[in-house]
Image (cartoon, helix red, strand yellow):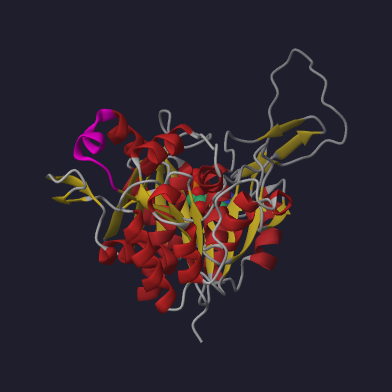
């Protein structure tokens, strides 16, 4: 039996709200559960009774109906995707600014599920630089926009701003739902963050990794239905909810944890910036300065990913390559000698790479497989990387 799909349908106040009623009927007929949230303005165009009758469920119009059930959070937790039809210029502006002054905007701000907007409005409003800038900002934050079409508008003129066809809206919805369930039933292990290798009780060797990439990948994989274990080094960042977190400090601890949690997983993604060496001797008491040079002998750490490569089985193994020069050639070497299925190349020269800002990734696989994932924030790159990896897993 196909699992029931649960859709949150937001309706904002434009004449195309009547088309949202037709769309609701289509969704209900194909077996989806639809929770409808209407803005106050939407209710001027179409009655909430229309949607309640079509869905045979209550229609949500206020933050203050049953507030003890915290509707704006519950609705987006229970749904697999949020879709707004139509999205007015005002709603888009509020979302771009993070305003959450009614149930629909609050729910969308709280959503960690895919969010799709189908704008519909007058052509001048759509083309105004304010609206265009708001749409670009929302796209960059991961919203999917189903562009409006050219056609007959409410003001009896032809122009751009007409709601996208139901077919295009359904295609966007189905793509998002397919992506959302792509890792259902899969076991995913992700290594993330730096390791710390102690010299003495107060000093250690480490690097600037924050674990942000691995944390975003873990969040995204969990959203797509996977059961995720995150092997996480010391970082200030909060791991995502809904993920099993195994804390490690040293490379050797990561190695031991990986043998337990990553061997046999369906997918392993190694983003951890593992220290390649550790001080050969560990002192139990703090080393005092003497004014002399200090020589510290370093011993090599185990290569966690290479060890997983040796025990690969049917695991799909993805590495990261932190490079400062000749990036792709170095990464392809790592792809081969660590027995990986794919490797994401990360330029850690300049300002990219470590830290929580933007990053730029290229994914390499096989002899000459290559896809640029572009430059973006780490949340967006995590989604693009998983899209690409899922595609490769389906073909492998
Ligand atoms: N990696 C690992 N264990 C290590 C070193 C690296 O699991 N001891 C993993 C990283 O998580 C990453 C990949 O191997 O997925 C490549 O890491 P990178 O630092 O780019 O390469 P190294 O193998 O350390 O090689 P080098 O530092 O010589 O470039």
The answer to which quarter of the image holds residue 125 is top left
Q: Is residue 322 visible?
A: yes
User: What residue appears at the point 45 percent right and 78 percent down from the top-left corner?
Assistant: 31
Answer with the quarter of the image where residue 303 lies: bottom right
Asked if residue 313 is positioned above or below residue 207 in the image, the reply reads below
Residue 34 seen: no
Q: Position of residue 187 (x, y in %)?
A: 59, 70
Residue farthest to the bottom?
Answer: 1
In this rendered view, identify the residue nearer to me: 166 or 215.
166
Q: Quadrant of the C terminus?
A: bottom left
For the image, the number of numbered tags is 0
The percent coordinates of residue 295 (x first, y second) are 68, 28
Question: Would residue 39 appear left or right of 63 to someone viewing this image?
Answer: left
- Name which residue lies at 84% across and 27% down: 286
Q: Nearer the viewer, residue 37 or 72?
A: 37
Q: Position of residue 138 (x, y in %)?
A: 39, 41
Q: Which residue lies most toward the top here?
A: 291
Nearest to the observer: residue 328 or residue 371: 371
| Magenta residues (range) | 120-129
241 in relation to 268, above or below: above
Magenta stretch, main secondary structure class: helix
């Amino acid at each position: 039996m196909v699992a029931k799909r649960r859709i949150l349908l937001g309706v904002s106040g434009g004449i195309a709200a009547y088309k949202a009623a037709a769309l609701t009927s289509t969704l209900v007929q194909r077996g989806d559960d639809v929770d409808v949230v209407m803005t106050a303005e939407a209710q001027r165009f179409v009655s909430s009774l229309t949607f309640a009758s079509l869905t045979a469920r209550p229609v949500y119009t206020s933050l203050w109906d049953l507030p003890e059930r915290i509707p704006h959070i519950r609705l987006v937790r229970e749904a697999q995707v949020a879709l707004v039809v139509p999205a007015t210029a005002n709603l888009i502006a509020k979302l771009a600014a993070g305003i959450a002054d009614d149930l629909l905007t609050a729910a969308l701000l709280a959503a960690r599920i895919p969010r799709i907007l189908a704008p519909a409005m007058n052509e001048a409003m759509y083309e105004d630089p304010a609206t265009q800038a708001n749409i670009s900002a929302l796209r960059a934050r991961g919203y999917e926009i189903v562009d409006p079409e050219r056609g007959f508008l409410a003001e009896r003129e032809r122009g751009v701003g007409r709601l996208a066809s139901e077919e295009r809206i359904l295609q966007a919805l189905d793509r998002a739902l397919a992506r959302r369930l792509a890792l259902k039933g899969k076991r995913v292990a992700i290594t993330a963050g730096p390791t710390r290798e102690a010299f003495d009780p107060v000093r250690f060797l480490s690097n600037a990794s924050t674990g942000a990439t691995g944390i975003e990948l873990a969040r995204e994989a969990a959203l797509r239905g996977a059961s995720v274990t995150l092997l996480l080094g010391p970082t200030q960042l909060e791991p995502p909810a809904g993920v099993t977190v195994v804390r490690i400090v040293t490379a050797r601890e990561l190695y031991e944890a990986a043998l337990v949690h990553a061997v046999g997983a369906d997918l392993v993604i190694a983003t951890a910036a593992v220290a390649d060496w550790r001080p050969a001797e560990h002192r139990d008491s703090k080393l005092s300065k003497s004014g002399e040079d200090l020589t510290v002998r370093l011993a090599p750490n185990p290569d966690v990913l290479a060890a997983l490569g040796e025990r690969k089985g049917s695991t799909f193994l993805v590495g990261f390559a932190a490079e400062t020069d000749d990036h792709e050639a170095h990464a392809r070497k790592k792809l081969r000698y660590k027995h990986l299925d794919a490797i994401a190349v990360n330029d850690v020269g300049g300002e990219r790479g470590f830290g929580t800002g933007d990053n730029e990734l290229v994914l390499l696989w096989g002899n000459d497989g290559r896809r640029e994932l572009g430059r973006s924030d780490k949340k967006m790159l995590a989604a693009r990387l998983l899209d690409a990896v899922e595609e490769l897993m389906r073909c492998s």
